Amino acid sequence: IDCLAKYRRATGDARLDEPLLRAVDFARLFVHPDHSYGGEYGSRGTYHFYPDGMELLAAEMPAAAELAEGFLRSLASGTAADFSDDRLVAHQLGNLIEAHGDWTPRRAKPHDPGPASSIQYLPKAGLLVRRQGSTHTVISAARGGVFKHFAHGGAVMTDAGLIVETADGRVAVSEQHDLGREITYSPGGEACSLMVSGPLAWTRFETMTPLKQMVLHAGMYTVGRWCRTAVRRVLQRRLITGRRPCGIRLTRRFELFEPGGLQRASLRVTDTIELVDPRLRVRRMSFGADHQSAYVAASGVYQSSVLTPWTDLAEHVARLNAERRVVVVREWP
């Protein structure tokens, strides 16, 4: 959005209007009630927001104006992701300076405020977004049911999926991005449901050592510089996209109800955890709030929601090992 908005300003190319409008409307779905943006449910769990493109479009596009204003409010309230203690501060710095120079008091007003509540399911992204008053829920089926839920009154719940340590010390997670999961969406009137199912994946604990660093540099200096794309793909598979399925299966069912309706909850999550490999036994498990198993340089920055406590599932471990299946039900207003 930022680059296309700059190109549009430089060239006046009207063909960019429609794709920019669609892109901005999509981005608008992920501004939360506390004005924070993005997070764990994204394909790589990042919090990036570059405001200059929104400032360039704010006078014409209501969604861009709302995004630009939301970012300013998040800075004032301290809910914006904080890159200032990380090398990534350089990525944002130039864009922030440009946004300051391009700020305009003219903000486009919505022509139609739209419905008070809406639920949108985006199948190609594997995302469901529910916006109903001050209740805001974003669910990533592509990431195995990672979700962020803002309840009435501003309380936030972040769930980054199931994390399990087996008896032999290995760790498996449910949150790796995979559009090939089994996903079923059932729209409804007063309620809708989303179910996602798939195996957990074993995690890697890849760390750089002096020997690995020397081998990498020597390889790139000699052969690797002639096949940089191939080297990059190997590293991506090893550190980011590679998945080794685990003999543990998680089926997560979401039920979304009208806030203030007959149901006392607006969100119910039912998790079914199954040990499909008879050799596996679990030592401990939790629903995490801020873990990221793939190497993503920009996913570890601070946002207030990372303070959400983990949900310890110690009380279910013995039963899971004995019966090979447990069901956990949670509700939020």
Image: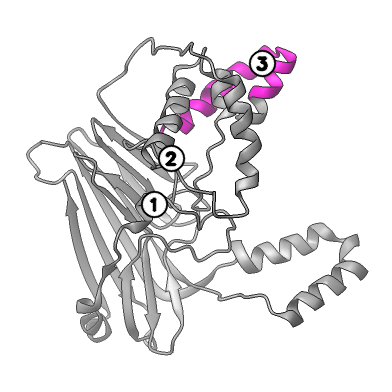
| Image marks 2 and 1: residues in contact by CB distance under 8 Å | no
Which part of the image, by quadrant, shows the N terminus?
A: top right
Is 35 placed left or right of 24 in the picture?
A: left
Q: Where is residue 240 in the image (x, y as percent from the top left)?
A: 60, 62
Residue under circle 1? Answer: 183
Identify residue type, mark 1: Ile
Q: Magenta part of the protein: which range?
A: 5-29
Mark 2 burial class by Cα count in 10 Å: few <14, some 14-19, many 20+: many
Q: Is residue 274 above or below residue 96?
A: below
Q: Which of 178 and 216 is in front in this view?
A: 216
Q: Position of residue 187 (x, y in %)?
A: 28, 38
Please state which of the two labelled residues, at mark 1 or mark 3, is closer to the viewer.
3
The amino acid type found where label 3 is placed reads Arg
Q: Where is residue 87 in the image (x, y as percent from the top left)?
A: 63, 54
The reply to whether callout 1 and callout 3 are in contact (CB within 8 Å) is no
> Between tags 2 and 3, which lies in front?
2
Secondary structure under the numbered disc 1 in the rendered image: strand
Principal secondary structure, stretch drawn in magenta: helix
The residue tagged 2 is: 37
- Judging by the rendered image, the residue that carries numbered circle 3 is 15
Badge 2 amino acid: Tyr
Q: In which quarter of the image is the C terminus?
A: top left
Of 113 and 320, the residue lying toward us = 113
The answer to whether residue 146 is visible is no
Q: Is mark 3 on a helix, strand or loop?
A: helix
Q: Does the magenta stretch include residue 17?
A: yes
Q: Where is residue 130 in the image (x, y as percent from the top left)?
A: 31, 37
